[in-house]
Image: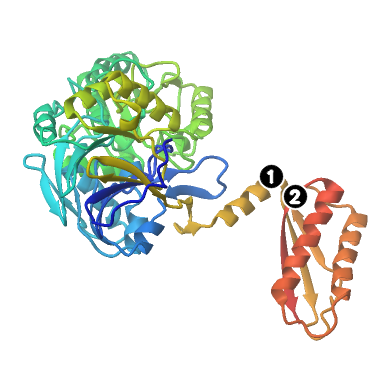
Amino acid sequence: MNNQNDIRLSSTGNKVSFIPIGGVGDVTKNMYLYEYKDEILIVDCGLGFADETMIGVDLLLPDISYLKNSGKKISGMILSHGHEDHIGALPFILPQLPSFPIFASPLTAAFANEKLKEFEVNNRVKTVNFDGGDVNIGSFKVSFIRVTHSVPDSANLFIKTPVANFYHASDYKIDFTPYDEKKVDFEKIARLSAEGVTCLMSDSLNSEESGYTPSEKLLAQNIEREMRECKGKFILTTYSSNISRLNQAIYASKQTGRKVCFLGRSLVTAMEVAQSLSYLKIDKGMEIRIDQIKNFRDNQLTLFAAGSQGQENSALTRIANDEFREVKIKQGDVVVFSADPIPGNELSINQVIDTLAKNGAKVLYSEICEDFHVSGHGASLDIMLMMSLVKPKNVLPIGGTYRQMVAFKNLAKLQGFDERQILLAENGQKIVFENEKVLFGQKIPIKNVYVDEVSGEAVDQFVLRDRQKIVADGVVIVMLEIDSGTGQAIEDPNIIARGFTFTDRELIKRLNNEIKQFLAKRKGRVTDWIYIRKNVARIGEVFMNKNIRKQPLIIPVVVEV
């Protein structure tokens, strides 16, 4: 990556900075800042998802330290579409920041407000329609442009500033025959871009794929065909926001005489929100409640089950493990995974697939069958078409891994861009647009922010390391009572080991002696109890590593008597 940190920038304010906080190189946690003078416009506020190494962690958040500490005013926020990796962090982030306006397209705003309602925040996100679709936020003017993606009402953003114009092309593909018939607004892209675009920030996730990404409409006939051949229950799992996929399966169910039922809170919520805006269409009498499933034969049922990523407590995982009272997997049932695995979820998804297959279901998923899911992200020709439409002076890939950003760079070269016009950034890297120059500014430190799946509170890095250590090598609790006047142990420490076998009495006795020898060196009243605890932990760590070749987490519990 080019680095021009040594170039001095003018202080005239005649510049705009672009700062990716999340979403560059790591796909999720999408959050991007546009900075002009003392104003900041935020685009998106997304979640990341923990992998199996992040013990006790469910979610990852963007690091908003810069927003809290920069001293600049947040003029507002724009949400590009309704996926979790673009709106999911709102309930965690907004309470930490001062109030500011938030705008989104109709379905995106509805999804975001429904999410915030759980946290007793009502109608914080305002709706912007695509007809017109312009909003003034401080010194920024933002136009919403309809594009196609795997959730309806997805928007690209034309961001106009006093210095330069930007085209923010968050997740999109060029679908010429979308299932909902709401096509990319090519005319608006061309009309706005004719004003001049300094930089195109573009989705790059599928830049390694050749050709165009297939159309959503191709799936409808495949779903109906498989549904007709299915002798038992037809179970489909997808992202809850994939309204087009739900509509396709609902239509196929109507054609094959099946009732539909939604299983799982996220799917039920998405269905209700989409229905309220007439994005989801279910004929009267088609939908049944969970308690009505027993009233119908298996071949009369289509079940929509949350859990396409193998989530531990999802409806699909509970069904697979025979923990869902109303639904039992039988021979003849078909389960369709109509979603790609999010990186890091492969193990949990495969476990659910194995369990479903073991119980007799026919399971169809992307590795063995491409008939039931297409990506919502543009492939190489989609991306090159977007470059041609926007005609930017510079391009910057977002929403992809680094290798996908490099693939995007190669596509840009085919479109005639030279090295200096192709900007590969990292999260936290400030890119400054000043006059006709593009400069790499300061690098803002970005840390991982983990959220505990139970409490919803942030988990510090050292807590995550402790959890990983417990899983790998177990935990040892050293409990001892110390006389505060003399600093000596009143009796032998009580040692409890979990996660591994530690029953050698001679070893326990030796560890006791080492702790007591440390205490014996101290004379008089104890004033620094932190020092005592740290040294007891250190003695335990060294002893365990030396004698049993393990590095368990040592927890000293010191009681002052």
Q: Contact, CB < 8 Å: mark 1 with mark 2?
A: yes
As drawn, 524 above or below 171: below
Q: Residue at x 69, y 72 (%)?
A: 530
Which amino acid type is marked by label 2?
Gln
Q: Nearer the viewer, residue 185 or 215?
A: 185
Question: Which of the two discs, 1 and 2, sits closer to the camera?
Answer: 2
- For the question of whether residue 294 can be seen, the reply is no
Mark earlier in primary sequence (1, 2): 1
Secondary structure type for disc 2: loop
Q: Residues within 10 Å of mark 2 (few under 14, many from 20)?
A: many
Residue 251 position (above or below residue 543)? above
Position of 13 compared to 209: left or right? left
Q: Which residue is mark 2?
A: 551
The answer to whether residue 430 is left or right of residue 452 is left
The three-letter code of the residue at mark 1 reads Ala
Residue 293 at x, y percent in the picture? 33, 34
**Residue 283 pos. (x, y %):** 15, 32
Q: Give the residue displayed 41% in from the left and 27% down from the top.
A: 406
The correct choice, above or below, for 501 with respect to 146 in the image is below
Most distant residue in the right direction: 506
Relative vertical location of residue 85 with respect to residue 467 in this rendering, above or below: above
Looking at this rendering, what residue extends furthest in the left direction?
132
Q: Secondary structure at mark 1?
A: helix
Q: Which residue is mark 1?
A: 472
**Residue 25 shows up from this direction:** yes
- Report whether 98 appears left or right of 315: left
Locate residue 544, reporting x and y percent.
81, 52
Nearest the viewer among 449 and 422 is 422
Position of 138 with respect to 20 (left or right) is left
Picture quadrant of residue 153: top left
The image quadrant that residue 139 belongs to is: bottom left
